[in-house]
Image (cartoon, rainbow, N blue to C red):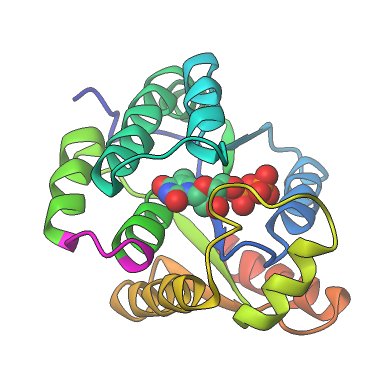
Amino acid sequence: MMISETSKGKFITMEGIDGAGKSTHLNWLADFFRSRGKTVVVTREPGGTRLGERLRELLLDNYQTMHGETEALLMFAARREHLDKVIVPALDQGNWVISDRFTDASFAYQGGGRGLPIQKLEVLEHWVQGLFQPDLTLYLDVTVELGRQRTSAIKTADRFEKERDEFFQRVRECYLERARKFPQRIRVINANLPLEQVNKSIEETIISFCK
Ligand code: TYD
């Protein structure tokens, strides 16, 4: 595994249940860094590469059924490609990389949501990324009810969005549990508030991270 330990750029990930508002805040965050002279690469998971985007189509397709372990393996397969082709090269060039989701989503959705054992996901995590972790993860925390309201307003539900509330409850609990486990890396942002307030707390978190 050739992941440079001396990478100059920073790797920031955004997480949250569906409808938490990641996309809006992600774009704001990219502009924030660009206005401070950083070169920013914005990417997403599953996806971010040609192969990864094709895997994403299969993973989100409502008509595609698959075993929970297949789902996890495909998520990590897309991630392996993403690290190799996008994330690591960009960091090595000194760019800042912001990803809409990363490995925490596999623990939350495939672990919490689908009920796969955490140990199996940890094996995949170590296989695919060694000790590599984001420098900072912003977890946008919303209630399942609010997330549901925000997603249903936008578009037709994909294979994950059509899951029941209990699924998202488990996903949310798993994210919160990980935030307690890795308090240095994962910052919880209360995203139940109006947009400007959520933005403000993201800004505060980022400013203290950059110090
Ligand atoms: P999402 O990021 O919510 O994109 P959009 O805003 O276009 O709906 O969609 C990605 C979905 O993939 C989301 O429901 C969570 C899921 N997912 C996992 O289950 N495991 C993972 O490891 C990742 C990266 C995503």
Quadrant where the N terminus is found in the figure:
top left
As displayed, is residue 155 above or below residue 89? Answer: below
As displayed, is residue 36 above or below residue 24? Answer: above
As displayed, is residue 137 above or below residue 1? Answer: below
Q: Is residue 101 left or right of residue 1?
A: right
Q: How many marks?
A: 0
State the residue at coordinates (17%, 61%).
117
Q: Is residue 99 magenta?
A: no
Question: Quadrant of residue 139 in the image?
Answer: bottom right
Q: Is residue 177 left or right of residue 117?
A: right
As displayed, is residue 16 above or below residue 61? Answer: below
Q: Is residue 53 left or right of residue 1?
A: right
State the residue at coordinates (85%, 73%).
195
Q: Position of residue 2 (x, y in %)?
A: 23, 22
Q: Is residue 208 left or right of residue 128?
A: right
State the residue at coordinates (47%, 75%).
172
Residue 102 at least partly seen: no
Q: Position of residue 11 (x, y in %)?
A: 49, 44
**Magenta stretch bounds:** 112-118
Q: Position of residue 8 (x, y in %)?
A: 46, 35
State the residue at coordinates (27%, 36%).
73
Quadrant where the C terminus is found in the figure:
bottom right
Q: Position of residue 84 (x, y in %)?
A: 37, 20
Residue 98 at least partly seen: yes
